[in-house]
Structures are given as C-alpha cells and as structure tokens.
Image (cartoon, grey):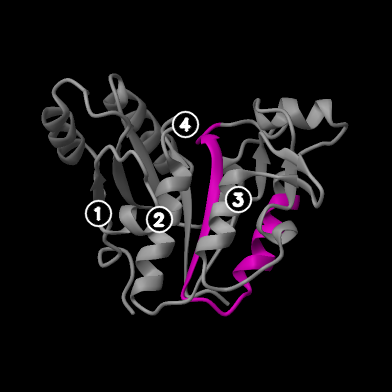
Amino acid sequence: MAKYKFFIAGTDTDVGKTVIAAGLLAAANSRGLSTVAIKPVAAGCEQTSEGLRNEDALLLQQTMSLKLPYEQVNPVALQPAIAPHIAAVQAGRRLLAAQLVGYCQGVLMQRADIAIIEGAGGWRVPLNRAETLANVAKELQAPVILVVGMKLGCINHALLTVEAIVRDGVPLAGWVANQLDDGMPCYAENLQSLKSLIAAPCLGEVPFLVEPTPERVSGYLSLDLVINL
C-alpha cells in the first residue's frame, strides 16, 4: 500500500494540475522514492489504435516509477473535451464517486512511497446530479495539494477552493503557485497575499516555462513539508 497519497486539485481548469502532478512525481523519483499515479476520469481523449488516450494521463504514466497499464492509470477515458459529467452522458455512461474511489484504491494498493491522484477541472466538478469529484477525495481522505493558476482573479479562486476543501473535511497538505504566463501584473504581491491567506504551506513557485517537463518543474517543488521518509 502507498505510504503517502495526495489528491491534486486545481483552482480551475487549465491551471497546470498535470504539470505539477508530474513534477511532484519526478521530484520523488529523483530522491529514489517509488511513485504511482492515477487520473481516474479524463475528458478530451484521442482515439488511437490502442483505444482512447489522454495526454495528461500518458504523462503521468510515463513519469511514475512503477509501471501500470494505461487502463489502470486512466480507467474512465472520455473523448469530448468538455465537463466530464456531460462527456459521460454523451458516451452513454454514468460517473459514480464509489466507482472512481474503487479504481483509486486499486492503485493505492501498489507498494509505492508516493501515490498521486489527479482530479479534473476544479474542486466542484460534477460527476452526476448528486456528486462531485470532491466526493472521491473525501472518501479516500487523500490530503489535497492545490494548484493555484497564477492569473488575475487567482486569490478569489484559491480562497474559495480552500474554503470548500476545509468544509468538506479533507486535509489541505499544501499548495503550489503555477505561473501561467510571464506577464501577470503584480505577481509578487499576489503570491505574498496567497501565502499570508492560505493556512497551508506553499510547496513551490513554478515560473512560466515554455517547455514544462516534469524534470524541470520538479526543481521548483519541495516534498519535505508533506512527507517524512
């Protein structure tokens, strides 16, 4: 069973959850730790000769040190690049939190030091009319690492997401500031505001990178505040 597990959530879609998740995996790998990851549901998959494939899930699969089949890394693959619950309806499927939890538990049973569970979109992305992806993190009691996409409005998005995570009773392990472009006005001031307002450690400040490979991103991240191995 994995010694440490983390749920990677974002303040919004396209804030770099996969970039940070892969960076955390690479950071752990560089310390000789074993890693595994799962993206239980992914929309925006492409049809290949091997079936539907999602580039984010493929990056996780390529970066983690333990080797698992794609179907275990991304058990629910949906083709349209839209909200997962809508994509599921279009595919004639129904997303259930219990089912996704089961998939995650299968991966968490692997003998790994670090297990990463990557969410989809933001914290309150619906799975169906009654459940959201937050239900998965809550059921697993997986400490959250929140990826804050550094852009105008990020403070409001971050604080609302933190409030929701805490209200749901899920531990907030830490957060990462991910700079989405190199021209954000008052970046330093926004970053300092977030550090003073979020009651969890900042695990890294990732600058805007033209080629954000897991290895490059890992250099800006620290696991020391969330693991003790």
* Furthest residue in direction right, as rendered: 92
At label 4, the amino acid type is Asp
Determine contact: label 4, label 1, CB under 8 Å. no
Give the extent of the magenta segment.
99-124
Q: In which quarter of the image is the C terminus?
A: bottom left
Residue under numbered circle 2: 214
Residue under numbered circle 4: 14
Among numbered discs 1 and 2, the one appearing first in the sequence: 2
Q: Which residue is drawn at 52% across and 72% down?
A: 65
**In the rendered view, would you say 120 is above or below 31?**
above
**Label 3: how many Cα within 10 Å (few below 14, some 14–19, many 20+):** many
Query: Residue 57 bears which disc, if any?
Result: 3
Task: Measure the alpha-carbon separation of dots 1 and 2.
Answer: 10 Å
Q: Residue at x 84, y 31 (%)?
A: 91
* Residue sitting nearer the eye, 166 or 196: 196
Task: Measure the alpha-carbon separation of dots 4 and 1.
Answer: 19 Å
Task: Measure the alpha-carbon separation of dots 2 and 3.
Answer: 13 Å
At label 1, the amino acid type is Tyr
